Amino acid sequence: MTVTVLQFGGSNCDRDAVRALEHLGIDAERRWHADGLPAETDGIVIPGGFSYGDYLRAGAMAARAPVMAEVRAAAADGTPVLGVCNGAQIGAEASLVAGAFTTNESARFQCEPVHLRVERADTPWTAAYDVGDVIRVPIAHGEGRFEIDADAYETLEADGRILFRYCDADGDVTDAANPNGSTGNVAGILGERETTAVLMPHPERATLPDVAASTDGQGVLRAFA
């Protein structure tokens, strides 16, 4: 199988994603967005970075690139799609998932390790974990606060579409453990299909044992296998 890692002007985690996937034995290739998706692709990663310099707002312009219509169609057909950081912002702007990602509560760019609690273990993205597991992965964003209206948030919870929540090292979901002010401490969610997911933390930066302080992100990327 081959995973397509999309590249926009300003993407800066595309190479990281390819290397992390290949470390797990998953073939991956970068693809410039203007070239569209390959005729056949077994999975799609929308990587982190600052597509179009976050002009207007993070992810807004990339979400309107023609390739995203192809991504939406692939997602609807069940092709695994993962948006990470800027990719999560693009995914929300492109209506792959509900809600939006806005400026951090601190109004500052934050780059630090965080803890996440696994909320579901019966999805491709979390099958390597158990419910309640705490994993440690890094964040690096200025617009990572997940925002959604109360009714839509209740629907997310009722439908079991929340994958990860920010927590402390003991797994407690608290305001102090919420790095950006996200509604409900949400760090990762599913789209309408369980094969589509977005998350603000970077699993690809917690995959390679030689360079990462943690390899807890490997389980997320193993979904493509």
Image (tube, grey):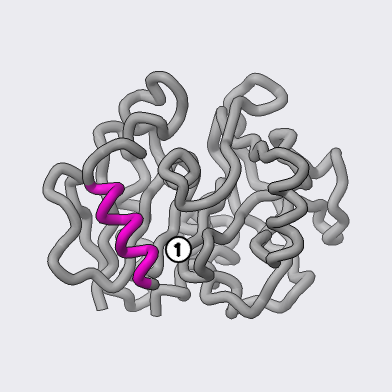
Q: What stretch is highlighted in magenta?
A: 67-77
Q: Which residue lies furthest to the front in this view?
A: 151
Whether the magenta-drawn stretch holds residue 68 is answered as yes
> Where's residue 104, x and y in %?
65, 28
Residue bearing the label numbered 1: 208
User: Which residue is at 45% across, 29% downward?
Assistant: 58
Q: Which amino acid does label 1 sit on?
A: Leu
> Most prominent secondary structure in the magenta stretch?
helix
Q: Is 103 positioned to the left or the right of 23 in the image? A: right
Q: Where is residue 71 in the image (x, y as percent from the top left)?
A: 31, 56
Q: Quadrant of the N terminus?
A: bottom left
Task: Identify the residue shown where x is 57% and y is 48%.
Answer: 98
Side (left or right) of 120 relative to 97: right
Q: In this view, does 51 lie above or below 29?
A: above
What is the secondary structure assignment of the residue under circle 1? loop
Image label count: 1
Determine crowd level at label 1: few under 14, some 14-19, many 20+ residues with C-alpha closer than 10 A. many
Q: On screen, 100 above or below 88?
A: above
Residue 98 in sight = yes
Give the vertical position of 133 relative to 201 (above or below).
below
Image location (x, y in percent) of residue 8: 26, 39
Q: In this view, does 30 lie to the left or right of 143?
A: left
Q: Which residue is drawn at 37% across and 46% down?
A: 13
Is 143 colored magenta in this rendering? no
Q: Would residue 38 appear left or right of 61 to someone viewing this image?
A: left
Identify which residue is drawn at 57% across, 61% down: 190
Image quarter for residue 54? top left
User: Does any portion of residue 23 appear in the rendered image?
Assistant: no
For the C terminus, the quadrant is: bottom left
x, y (%) of residue 197? 51, 60
